[in-house]
Image (cartoon, helix red, strand yellow):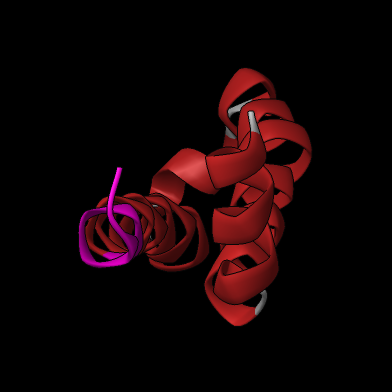
Amino acid sequence: MTGKSFRTAVRAGHIVLSLVLGTYLYSPWSENPAFTAITLYVVFSLMALSGVALWKQAIIMRWIKRS
């Protein structure tokens, strides 16, 4: 996997997760307890991890190339 394809994939996932988070903030679905739990525990965690992956891409790419 090249650096460009890694960044493109992680960026696309980050954008999709931000759309789900925006849906939670601005829609009446936030009153649904299941949607709230999924958004708070899964979506927000994955969004934080993808943000760190975008930030530390060089280190991650070195780790992938060693494996």
Q: Residue 3 occupies which quadrant of the picture?
A: bottom left
Instruction: Tell me the chief SS of the magenta region.
Output: helix
Task: Assign the N terminus to one quadrant of the image.
Answer: top left
Residue placed at 41% from the left, 60% from the top? 14
Residue farthest toward the bottom in the current orientation of the protein = 55
Task: Assign the C terminus to one quadrant of the image.
Answer: top right
Q: Is residue 18 magenta?
A: no
Position of residue 16 in the picture relative to residue 41 (left or right): left
Residue 18: percent from the left, percent from the top?
41, 63
Q: From which residue to which does the magenta span run?
A: 1-7
Residue placed at 61% from the left, 62% from the top? 53
Residue placed at 23% from the left, 67% from the top? 4
Q: Is residue 58 above or below residue 36?
A: below
Decide which of 27, 48 is in the foreground and name it: 48
Position of residue 62 in the picture relative to residue 4 (left or right): right
Q: Residue 22 occupies which quadrant of the picture?
A: bottom left
Residue placed at 58% from the left, 28% from the top? 32
Position of residue 65 in the picture relative to residue 12 (left or right): right
Q: Is residue 22 above or below residue 33?
A: below
Position of residue 63 in the picture relative to residue 18 (left or right): right
Residue 7: percent from the left, percent from the top?
33, 65
Residue 34: percent from the left, percent from the top?
64, 19
Residue 44: percent from the left, percent from the top?
67, 52
